[in-house]
Amino acid sequence: MTTSDRAAPGGELSLRVIALERDTNPNGDIHAGWLVSQMDLAASNTAGRLAEGRTATVSIKQLDFISPVRVGAEVSCYTRVEEIGTSSIHIEVEVWTRDLTSQQPRKVTEGKFVLVAIDATGRIRPVPNKAR
């Protein structure tokens, strides 16, 4: 079963927000850029805990938009760590929504983010050994 076929979210709940009308595109759906920024926040939240400090997103390896997000939907980002390298953390992010009129969650987006641990000056540093 692929992650797209799953009936429930996988991973850890890392962020939950409500999609507002101010976040829409000209078609009235939630703008993809807003959704990607929520995914990046969720990945950064997870990576920061593992890195015990600052991280920076260096790559989005894959990003699939499955279904539009509606205004007023509860947007939940779930993260799952795929790999931890010397300084990098690879995280899969799934986005599930629940509309005002439904209790059934719906997967709308998934992507793979790569973040690196950085020090106070912005230079790449190792992820602590206990996280690896």
Image: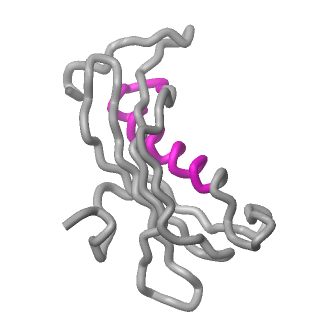
User: Is residue 130 depicted above or below 44 in this figure?
Assistant: above
Q: How many marks?
A: 0
Is 112 on the left-hand or right-hand side of 102?
left
Magenta residues?
35-55
Image location of residue 60, percent across then percent down: 47, 38
> Which residue occupies the extreme bottom position in the image?
101
Q: Image quadrant for the N terminus?
A: bottom left
> Going 42% across and 70% down the picture, which residue do you hit?
107
Image location of residue 108, percent across then percent down: 48, 67
> Going 29% across and 56% down the picture, which residue do you hit?
11
Q: Image quadrant for the C terminus?
A: top left
Q: Is the image coloured rainbow, by chain, by secondary structure, or in one colour?
A: one colour
Residue 46 in magenta stretch: yes
Residue 126 in magenta stretch: no
Is 128 on the left-hand or right-hand side of 108?
left
> Going 50% across and 78% down the picture, which residue do you hit?
98
Image location of residue 79, percent across then percent down: 36, 51
- Front in this rendered view, residue 2 or 114: 2
Residue 126, by quadrant, is: top left
Is 5 on the left-hand or right-hand side of 19?
left
User: Is residue 3 depicted above or below 126 in this figure?
Assistant: below
User: Is residue 79 depicted above or below 103 in this figure?
Assistant: above
Residue 9, by quadrant, is: bottom left
Main SS of the magenta part reads: helix
Image location of residue 43, percent across then percent down: 44, 42
> Going 65% across and 67% down the picture, which residue do you hit?
19
